Image (cartoon, grey):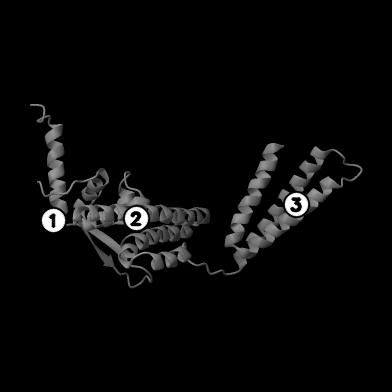
Amino acid sequence: MADLPRLSPIEIEILDLLRAREMYGLEMVRASTKLKRGTIYVTLDRMTDKNLVRSRAVEDPTVSGMPRRVYSLTALGQRAWSAHSAAVQFFSNGEVLT
Amino acid sequence: MMSLMRSFLLFNIRLSILSRRHPLYTYGTLWLIFISMVFIGFILNPKPNLRGTWILIQIGAIAASSSTFIMYALFSYLQSLITVIHSPPASGIVRLLQCVFPTKAFDRIFSQIVIDFRDEHAEMLALKRPYRARWLSVCLVGTLVLTTALWISTTMVKRAVSIWRIS
């Protein structure tokens, strides 16, 4: 638990979305109300540096130009999400008050 | 009267913005400038029958707006007849960003934003919503400026933290 990185609300939202499947940045923006186009890629870049998510370029042979990147969770990202959800469940059950 | 003048001014501004994208509209704007000059000359040297300044202003504004609208419609029709090849949105800015930023940052951040907006731009054009597509082009530039500022500030903080850790 101690070696897990701290997560911002935006990072938690991204991890939550990526739990189900790998997604593009625009898909994440469309699927969430918290994420904004202007900030999501900077956040994803930071999360990649923190090894919470990984990305790979997807080349479409029918479309010329820059390749899209698709994002997925890493093992550390999965652990960080599990720890966060466990903490939320712990506090929501009121166990901290007892 | 004031609302008429304001709409006349807004129309002029809008036409000027459109002229940047469509060469044919430039002639529309030139026509508007010509009519405006005639209108100003008409106010400065009124005819003997029409001496009321407000009446002259109203007649001039209506004449300039309506004639510009006709020219605008005519040029729109001509525009639809010819094939114009447009460069994709923000293509100039993309070249600049490619030169300025590291490859990694460009590939991971800026190119992804551009791809997203270009996809949506193409979608809107396919749905016959050109004004929405143009608005997305404007948004793309705004988003790139915002992201550049965010990236620079994030990088500076990262560097500062790494220097602090070393020291």
Is B48 left or right of B103, judged from the image as shown? right
Q: Which amino acid does label 3 sit on?
A: Ser
Q: Name the residue under label 3.
A: B36
Tell me the element at label 2.
Answer: helix
Estimate how packed mark 1 is, as few (under 14), some (14 to 19) or many (20 or more) residues with alpha carbons within 10 Å: few
Could you say where residue A65 lies in the image, as x and y percent from the top left? 38, 70
Residue, x 44% and y 56% (percent of image)?
Answer: B140
Write down the quadrant of residue A94 in the picture. Answer: top left
Is B158 left or right of B19, judged from the image as shown? left
**Residue with the most extreme front position:** B167
Total marks shown come to 3
Q: What residue type is labelled 2?
A: Trp
Question: Which is closer to the viewer, label 2 or label 3?
Answer: 2
Q: Which of marks 2 and 3 is nearer the N terminus?
A: 3
In the depicted structure, whether residue B30 falls above or below residue B1: below
Residue, x 11% and y 50% (percent of image)?
Answer: A3
Quick one: A70 or B98, which is closer to the camera? B98
Q: Have a look at marks 2 and 1 and say if they share a chain.
A: no
Chain for disc number 3: B
Could you say where residue A14 lies in the image, as x and y percent from the top left? 25, 49
Q: Have a look at marks 1 and 3 and say if they share a chain.
A: no
Q: Name the residue under label 2.
A: B151
Question: Which is closer to the viewer, label 2 or label 1?
Answer: 2
Write down the quadrant of residue B57 in the picture. Answer: top right
